[in-house]
Image: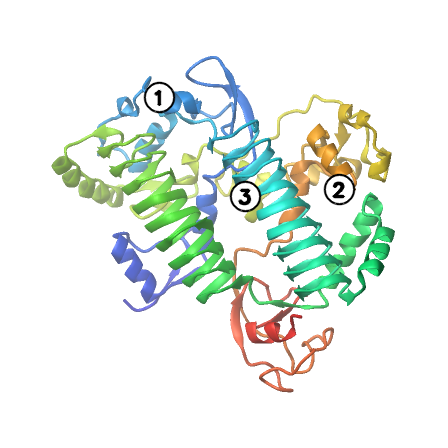
Amino acid sequence: MPAETKTCQNCKTEFRIEPEDFAFYEKIKVPPPTWCPECRLQRRMLFRNEMNLYKRKCDCHEEMVFTSIAPESQTKIYTADMWYSDKWDPIDYGREYDFSRPFFDQLKDLIKEVPRLNLTALRLIDSPYCNNASGLRSCYLLFNSETSENCVYGNGITDSKEVFDSYFMKQMEHGYEDFVCLRSYNVFFSSNVSDSQDIYFSDDLVGCSYCFGCVSLRNKHYMIFNKPYSQNEYNEKIKAFDVGSHENVMKLRNQLVGSRLRFPVKYMHGRQNMDVSGDYITHSRNVHDSFFIDDFENCKFCFSMGLKPTKDCYDFCWGGAAELVYEAVSVGLNTNQLRFVYELWPDCFDQTYCGFCPGSSHLFACIGLRNKQYCILNKQYLKEEYESLVPKIIQHMNDVPYTDSQGRVYRYGEFFPPELSPFAYNETIAQEYFPLTKEQALEQGYGWRDPEPRHYEITIAVQDLPDHIKDISDSILKETIGCAHCATSNVAQCNEQCTTAFKIIPQELEFYRKMNLPLPRLCPNCRHYQRLKQRNPLKLWHRKCTCGGSTSENGIYTNQTSHFHGSTHCPNEFETPYAPDRPEIVYCEQCYQAEVI
């Protein structure tokens, strides 16, 4: 089919469906979408709560447990021991399909009645306050993470040890306040660092060691602000920076922000790719409009996935090791032919509008089934009955569509409506990427959860904390510290789920002392949101390379070598997550590689 331009029924903007998109929709047997890619992503994100935990009673007994489902939610929860046991059977919740009611009304009832896991967590040892995690040991408030040890306050931490307050780290040991770092050791207050060690306040380093305040270096050693020093000179100079002082750290972090703007950035973060567009893509081919992707093929509109191999998937978030998946959240490990699904692990095949159905195949509109086949609304059918009934239900979905409070129409081919999510908007990952105020969320038909009243008493204000870690005594473990957002009287306007106060745990204090790092001044939630500001948006703009010939367009950066286009402006164009009005110097692959040293 030729390309087609449609108007998103949610945001009313135009979006384009390409011929290859139509080919994928035909292959997986779904109609083309009526929502634009960005609105589809936001809608899927409403079904993932990564970092909000609550304490409530398990619905199978009186035990209080930690869960991602708020106490006032109508969704029932079971602990893993109960959920995976033979003490109950999800098939008992099965019901006949009612052709007098819209499909999503019926599915909503089933979602409310079938218990779900209190947490999405496996094989955790001494790590009770973690979610969307597996294989953790002695970790605290770690989310979207796996196979790590002694890590605290992080998201996306994999195969790492002693990493604190960081985002998207892999094979790291000893890190603090870092953003996207790989296979490195002793990295602090830095971003986009790989295969390096002993790095402070730096960005875009590969194969480096003993670098302080550096940007865009390759295989360099003993560098301070991109200038080389002898080992002795380096060791003497960094002592003067004294990073155990909070005041010094803040000055150095601000200095790094300025340094980044004086050097070119590549139009996207990625390597070893062929025909890709997006950001943070590696080892992939024919992958477009995707972000934080590793080893994917023939995929589009995907986000935050590294399980491999994965191919022929559209609109897919968190997961992988899958094929032919469309409109899915948290799905993977030997999965195939999945449409409009969430939380399906592992060995799932041919499921549509399902959630929490491991080891199952040929399911339509089922919740919580395990190792089942040929079921609809959790009711068991014979193969012939199932294959006869599913097309009739799809036709009914089109003839009698579901309409939400905003007038958005849901026929077959739409992901779950927001009101089927057990989470309020500000509990989900959507709030991180598409932040809304309470008023905006309610106006757009989303739920909102006001923070619970805080009954603790702040015992010390941030301005009263000693500046240097050497002056912090063990008594700090007994204090309740007011978040700096409270101290500046703007907590009411804080849209970062501020907890207003926080405590220092022993594991944390030991790490700060060992690494000579000052105490934080913000609560963990606000610290997380400060790190997120380093992320580029999940959106692309068409731009030209800003290499003007011998210098960057803005004249700030002078090229260190001649480029393929000589003294004339670079002709290359690309899709980039750097918006045209941003201050970064954005170079194409050829110009960037010519300049990185």
x then y, percent, for residue 166: 64, 44
Mark 1 = which residue?
85
Mark 2 = which residue?
515
- Using the image as rendered, state which of residue 552 and residue 295 is in the foreground: 295
x then y, percent, for residue 115: 39, 24
Asked whether disc 3 touches disc 1, contact meaning CB atoms under 8 Å apart, the reply is no
Drawn side of residue 66 relative to residue 470, left or right: left
Report crowding for label 2: few under 14, some 14 to 19, many 20 or more residues within 10 A (C-alpha).
some
Q: Which numbered disc, 2 or 3, marks the residue that appears first in the sequence?
A: 3
- Indicate the quadrant where residue 127 lies: top right
- Between marks 2 and 1 in the image, the one whose residue lies nearer the viewer: 2
x then y, percent, for residue 327: 37, 48
**What residue type is disc 1 on?**
Ser
Q: Which quadrant does the C terminus fall into?
A: bottom right
Label 2 and label 1: CA atoms lie apart by: 45 Å
Report crowding for label 3: few under 14, some 14 to 19, many 20 or more residues within 10 A (C-alpha).
some
